[in-house]
Amino acid sequence: MYTRNVSLRRDPMVDLLYQLEHRMGRIAPEPVSAFEWSGPETTTATNWLPPVDIFEEPNEIRLVAEVPGVKPEDVTISVLGNLLTIKGTKDQVPEEKAEKVHRYERTYGAFERSFTLATSIDPNKIKATYNLGLLTITLPKAETAKPRLIRVEVTPEKALRA
């Protein structure tokens, strides 16, 4: 994978938005599911944060990150223990034909998002795909983390009387 050193300043607005989201979550928390992300998501000095949807299936967890304009070779995905980290860079391509730029609203630069996994993942089976600006990371659950049905055996009545 391709990586590069980028010197960045931490955007104070990212911290403010995270604090607001955290406070709003205490006021109107979402319903608690059987699977939760333990601990807060961590961020580092970034220029932007791609939105991420997280889905849980019986055998896997899927993260879908919206990363339009990011080349797949500019994305690094790593798992260390129970911490999943997605890093990447979206380069700004200057408009050479325009005489004057009136506005830049799209975001560019480096991003990094980390998520603490609350269940065991099989790191050897993680897959990542990229299609139409969506990065999908499939994290298969380890056998020990999958729900297991326990069969109830019926004992014969004679054994109960003895």
Image (spheres, rainbow, N blue to C red):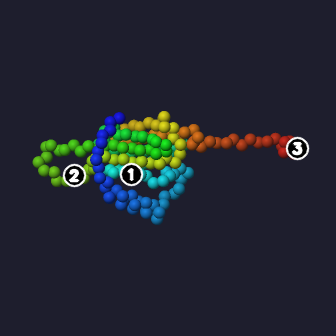
User: Can you name the residue that lies furthest to the left here?
Assistant: 99
Residue 47 placement (x, y as % from top left)? 30, 51
| Local SS, label 1 | strand
The residue under the point 32% across, 38% down is 3
Of labels 3 and 2, earlier in sequence is: 2
Of labels 3 and 1, earlier in sequence is: 1
Name the kind of residue labelled 1 in the image: Thr
Residue 75 placement (x, y as % from top left)? 35, 40
Residue 162 shows which numbered tag?
A: 3
Whole-angstrom CA distance, mark 3 to mark 2, is: 84 Å
Q: Is residue 66 left or right of residue 30?
A: left
Name the kind of residue labelled 2 in the image: Tyr
The residue under the point 62% across, 42% down is 148
At label 2, counting other C-alpha atoms closer than 10 Å, the crowd grade (few under 14, some 14-19, many 20 or more) is: few
Q: Please name the residue that numbered disc 2 is placed on.
A: 104
Q: Is residue 95 left or right of residue 27?
A: left
User: Can you name the residue that lies furthest to the right here?
Assistant: 162
Whole-angstrom CA distance, mark 3 to mark 1, is: 64 Å
Residues under numbered marks 3 and 1 in contact, where contact means CB atoms less than 8 Å apart? no
Q: Please name the residue that numbered disc 1 is placed on.
A: 43
Q: Quadrant of the C terminus?
A: top right
Q: Is residue 116 visible?
A: yes
User: Can you name the residue that lies furthest to the bottom here?
Assistant: 27
Residues under numbered marks 3 and 2 in contact, where contact means CB atoms less than 8 Å apart? no
The residue under the point 19% across, 53% down is 103
| Local SS, label 2 | loop
Residue 86: which quarter of the image? top left
The residue under the point 86% across, 42% down is 158
